[in-house]
Image (spheres, coloured by chain):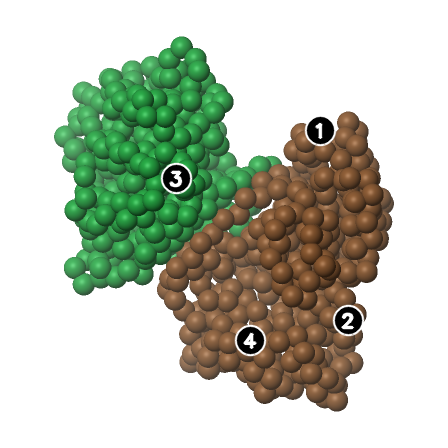
Chain colours: A brown, B green
Amino acid sequence: MLNFSFQNTTRIHFGEGKISAISREIPIDAKVLVTYGGGSIKSNGVYDQVVAALKDHQWFEFSGIEPNPSYNTLIKAVDLIQQHKIDYVLAVGGGSVIDGSKFIVAAACYKGDDPWHIVSKQEKIQQALPLAAILTLPATGSESNTGAVITRDGHKLPFGSPLVRPVFAVLDPTVTLSLSDRQISNGVIDAFVHTIEQYLTYSVNGKVQDRFAEGLLLTLIEEGPKALQADTKNDLDVRSNIMWAATMALNGLIGAGVPQDWSTHMIGHELTGRYGIDHARTLSIILPAVMKVRRTEKHDKLLQYAERVWQLTTGSDDEKIDQAIALTEQFFTSMQVPTRLSQIEVGVDAIDELLDLLEQHGMVALGEHQDIDLAVSRQILITAL
Amino acid sequence: MLNFSFQNTTRIHFGEGKISAISREIPIDAKVLVTYGGGSIKSNGVYDQVVAALKDHQWFEFSGIEPNPSYNTLIKAVDLIQQHKIDYVLAVGGGSVIDGSKFIVAAACYKGDDPWHIVSKQEKIQQALPLAAILTLPATGSESNTGAVITRDGHKLPFGSPLVRPVFAVLDPTVTLSLSDRQISNGVIDAFVHTIEQYLTYSVNGKVQDRFAEGLLLTLIEEGPKALQADTKNDLDVRSNIMWAATMALNGLIGAGVPQDWSTHMIGHELTGRYGIDHARTLSIILPAVMKVRRTEKHDKLLQYAERVWQLTTGSDDEKIDQAIALTEQFFTSMQVPTRLSQIEVGVDAIDELLDLLEQHGMVALGEHQDIDLAVSRQILITAL
């Protein structure tokens, strides 16, 4: 096991009816900005629950945070905060709203030249307003972690700080019953690949971390398809298990003390930035190619994945690995996401530009060994065609 | 899954050499009390590392916190704190030192008639000094949780508060290399039974919690015996996996959203209180009896335990359960702990007195269904003879 430091301070309120907890969690004298996205929270009852819970608070709202939240949108919320002297932000939504709100709480306290430097220059965040989250779409884990991804002019870039980690997060699985199949499937794939990025590397004999990661993968494989099937999609246990698995997949725990990859994410980000492809769908396309191209480097963990997650007990090691990769693709297909660039109409002629973007963003030494250079990324993209 | 709220704020510093982290973790202007036990930290190098790390701090020390820490000892540390206006406590030791220090930090700020009421009357703790921990014996999980058990006049009683949760904890597995076989085996058993108390109840379909618990049990079953065998006992990976598993076994995570039992612990506490038996050895004696007596109520989870932890795939459900209980006992025996009261020379004539003690401590409705009354506890004790 590698040395590590780990802390996750977010208080989780999990279960049906837990949105009302915000009344006592947010200080009564706070001036609150409620941030959200396209208004689905108004049709699924979440907005009404927030209004009811905040009846004794002074609060404002900022809507219109889009998927892959953009700097240009978020900076308007910062203006609103300064105008009304807001001192607490409550993000109500999925990863995009929460990620965007992380930028908002940091930018609102930024004292330098240009708050974009938080992202573009990775300037250390010195101060941020307190942020809380009501999660409506289990996927990114943003509700209890320190990271966020912000988009500007087609560039999708990460930043992070313990100061932007939500103080508390409400996870009410009933809220997810109104999600579309596409949203649910994207969320399950996102959580699955988050787990894989922290698991499918090389072994450091971290038995707890490995078994926790395998537990999350098994849960997502079992429960994900049920959330798309007519007879099981409204089962609250299914939704609860997906929601808790997605939070645990990226709250820092399973990645503590083990190597991490993240090449699938970094290559996938360019597909989203350039073509606007849903984040999860870039992952379902790139991950199988990463498994194939990095088969030698990841051999031992691929075999462990085959045996423990897919319960493959017969055949040679290579056969087990082949089958595990095929079963991963089948799982993705059952989740109604693409596994090839051709399915999203991106062809071989796009690869040079994607590699240029990777280079431009400094993504030239990816993976757990930092040896996925542009040539290897090219191989991965070709394999994904 | 049941509704839950979960938070664990303790910052973990894990790995070789991490004790030096206390220099920057403890505020430089703090007046620190270093608490410890019988002095083993002076022979294994931990004390010297603490002294080196605190060279720029003002600090005092209080030694002699015994296994099953007693009120009479702890209250002396409270006097020392008041005398020197100490404002930070650093516990260096295992669960007893950390549990005892939790009482110390709460009692030091207690404003009522008698600090023992924190335990005896479960008075809510309003304030506590900050506490940090350097863990030397992986077992209780006390280094990152809110609970503690204190002994007075033969009575072993629990209390807890988020205010006594350590701010940070250092887990350096090299420190555990100097432990005796008995200490290691006690620690592994304690962590194992902590996990079982939160797992072996009835199913609420909490898939993440179940798989995490199973992952901890598998890790302890694999690594525990290695820590006792000459050729593997100095393997740092073995020690690291045991240490991290023990922390995760009782940090609140695997118990969030699922029912909990704790009858083995409550009955075991009376054996320690009355006869001074090591805590873990009371658990290894009582747990198999609980499994046998509560076989019907725990049927589904016992079967899942048999199939997933012991990989029992053939035979009837009852046969699998029989075998799982037998394998649990074999595992305990391989860890060199007793599985019967007769092995610690407690006979049938002791049972009435143990039941009196349970009654006296209000332990008359134990278990996940609160239906283990004194008659069922009697059955359990008889079964454990």
Assess disc 1: are there few (<14), some (14-19) or many (≥20) residues with their C-alpha within 10 Å of its C-alpha: few
Q: Amino acid at mark 3?
A: Ala
Seen from the viewer's position, the closer of residues A105 and A238 is A105
Mark 3 = which residue?
B132
Q: Earlier in the sequence, mark 2 or mark 4?
A: 2
B204 is higher (above) or lower (below) than A373: above
Residue drawn at x 21%, y 58% as measured from the top left: B233
Element under disc 1: loop
Mark 2 = which residue?
A154
Q: Position of residue A369 (x, y in %)?
A: 47, 76
Mark 4 = which residue?
A366
Q: Is residue B306 at least partly visible in the picture?
A: no
Mark 1 = which residue?
A28
Residue drawn at x 49%, y 49% as measured from the top left: A7
Whole-number angstrom distance, CA of label 2 to CA of label 4: 21 Å
Residue drawn at x 32%, y 48% as measured from the top left: B53
Whole-number angstrom distance, CA of label 3 to CA of label 1: 31 Å
* Nearest-to-viewer mark from 4 and 3: 3
Pointers 4 and 1 in contact (C-beta within 8 Å): no
Q: Position of residue A136 (x, y in %)?
A: 72, 48
In which chain is the residue bearing label 4?
A: A
The quarter of the picture where the N terminus of chain B appears is: top right
Q: Position of residue B157 (x, y in %)?
A: 34, 23
The quarter of the picture where the C terminus of chain B appears is: top left
